[in-house]
Image (cartoon, rainbow, N blue to C red):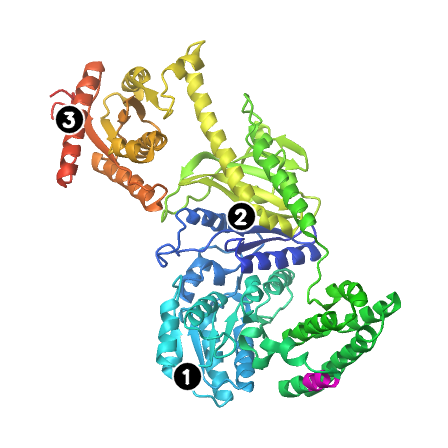
Amino acid sequence: MANRRYNIGLLVATISDEFSKRVTIGAMEAAKQLDANMVIFPGKYVGVQHINEHYNAEYEYQYNVLFDLAAEAKLDYLIVAVGTIAYAHNNEYQKAFLDSLGDTPILSVASGIEGYDCLQFDNRSGVSAAVDYLASHGRKHIGMIAGDLSNEGFVQRYEAYREALEANGLEYKDSYMVTCGLAYRCYGEVEQLLNENPELDAIVCTTDLIAYDVYEVLKKRNIRVGVEVAVVGFDDLPGDEKLDPPLASVRADAVQIGRKAVEKAVNYLNGVQDDCHYIESQFIPRRSCFKYVDDFNISERIFCGDFSAMVDHIRDYFTKRCENATADQHSCDQIIALVEHLYQNYAQHPVDESIVEDTVAILEQAIPLREDTGIDRILYGTYVWILRNCPVSNVPYVEMLHQYFRAEKSEETAESVAKRFMERSYLDNVFIRDSLMFGGNLKHSYARIMKKIDSVGAVTAFIYTFDKPITHSYGDQFPKDLTWTFQSYSYGDDVFSLPKDKQQISTPQVFDNDFTCQNRQHIFIVADLFSAETQYGIALLEPRDETFLDELELVTYQLSSAVRTLDILKKQEKLLKELHTTNLALEKMSKIDELTSVYNRKGFYPAAQELIHDPRYQGKSFVICYADMDNLKLVNDTYGHAEGDFSIRLVADCLAHTLGDNAVIGRMGGDEFAAIVPLPEGVTVASLTSRKEAFIRRFNESKEKPYQFGVSLGMHECACQNSDDLGAALNKADDLLYIEKRNKKRGIKVRAYPRAASQTGKG
């Protein structure tokens, strides 16, 4: 790295996923510390749509275009969290995914893949510690709910569970373990486990999400979590401590794995041997597997009777814990000293401020004890006890100590939280507003989009678009070796547009060019700019700090919306320039249907004639269509005319999707539409019909509206040369429309009408 910094790529799944977010935070920290540039590609989970029917993510596949771009970026090294990106697949699929990324050196994260250096969690240590913990505190019948055992991580957790049972002399039966595959919910598997093994007193889950389902089933059966049945998860998600009771889990520190991954990348590039492949996992005990059931009622059980009785109760509690005799004795002595201090100084005598200072000092010494959930409950129980048993004059002094008895202290108030939220909302709204203020001249509009992007946490930003928007359907391979247009960039409040001669660049230049912060270390997050099936380009965003990760999806959606709107406006501007008249805009408006933005009857015929006489289409076949909406009256009568108007607009959208950009579409009145489109090579009336049906099916499956949307469409293929041909063809299409509507009522599927033998559209 004599002349330049290394450029390291990080591929993660959705950034809103806690694991991916924390890996990213750790990687960002290490990149700054090691003075390496980083490009973060936050895609989504690959290939889950066909595996999990409950996973509603119709267009999430678009984000994974970023992984294709990472392969072409020619970075120095790629860190790939393939264990989460392709969590729904086995090692063979994950290896194929890594193979597709090309020749760049790769580190596989969260999954060990043959042929690749890897960094993953030691799943075994945490699970073994959890089973040891359960066994040492009297749990004798321990079951497991595992994920898909074709996944290496789940296999390791299962094997560690079996080995730990054997090491503790506990029985294992085949019925003690059930798998739940990749199901969205696993209530059925939990029910099966409990029904077949009523003696179970503990359940180990290979993820926290599985454990959440176990909670629900146990509570429906009136089985107390942590009392009759202990529950342990894996991942230590932020929500674990908020459950009732808090969930014990195995913590796999994703921040640490992110840091170490970047360190391994730099070591590799510097030629330094790095044999670290595992990050330790740690078992975190909480109330869902309390070793001592009475911990649920610490306050009621300990703080009763006179002072000497309370001291005996405290000693009895620590004696029964029997976890670490030396540590427990030390904790016991500290708690008794605190209780004695409070009893003597607050329960017996008036308090002054010097006593309060002494108490604070004692409580601050007890801070390390709060890591133990049971002791933390004793500390807070102590506060409640002294508050109830001190003279009235001492109550204000006791209340001053409240924050020191709590496990977590926060400087924030409700007012400060509300103020911060309002400030954040204001900045987001300013960015959204200004990103859509294009003005009349589109030349510098890409720069205007970025004017306020620094307000939401991106200190620099770069926008690149494809020469033309790319239609990218699910399952299609994204094109390679694209040429990009470098539209604009920003540094803080300053925004710049690129001169024409510097705009055309290759994929590697997108991530490393003369404008991308060459004189300092930088970290970029790649935002995919798309709408539905259309890809427009990407943005590189340099975050001010890790808090920007929470803003990323908002910024991505807004930039996508702005770029899409710009694309529409550019197409409109191009169309306006092609119309040779001084009053072009006004004339166009008079020919456009206000509700649907397609041509009205007045505008359709001239536009259709112009298309027919276009030299490019002389001698070519056209498809002429007549369409209307199914059951418009029912929608109007049942849901109101606003919904009827929405449906009419949707008919126009359906025709535009079906026929493509070259089509001329007109609303002839009510819900009736006409259209004409030159028929491209390889496209048939039947394929257009399939495209229409796919559009309708996707909309209805989205359940966006309470009614079923439908369009009847008559399509006639012919050679159109003049207005007479057009009129005859429209009549033929209208006849076909009538036949289709009649057959729909009879439940008959309509066949495509054959091409007219005369090729004139007449008769």
Q: Residue drawn at (41%, 50%), measured in percent from left and top?
A: 57
Please state if 435 lies on the left or on the right of 189 as rendered: right
Residue 198 appears in the rendering: yes
Other-residue count near label 3 (Cα within 10 Å), few / some / many at <14 / 14–19 / ≥20:
some
Can you identify the residue that label 2 sits on?
A: 73
Label 1 sits on a secondary structure element that is: loop
Label 2 sits on a secondary structure element that is: loop
Q: Are marks 2 and 1 in contact (CB under 8 Å)?
A: no
The label on residue 285 is none
Which amino acid, mark 2?
Answer: Ala
Q: Is residue 704 above or below residue 369?
A: above
x, y percent for residue 499: 59, 28
- Badge nearest the viewer, 3 or 1: 1
The label on residue 735 is 3
Of labels 2 and 1, earlier in sequence is: 2
- Residue closer to the observer: 583 or 503: 583
Label 3 sits on a secondary structure element that is: helix
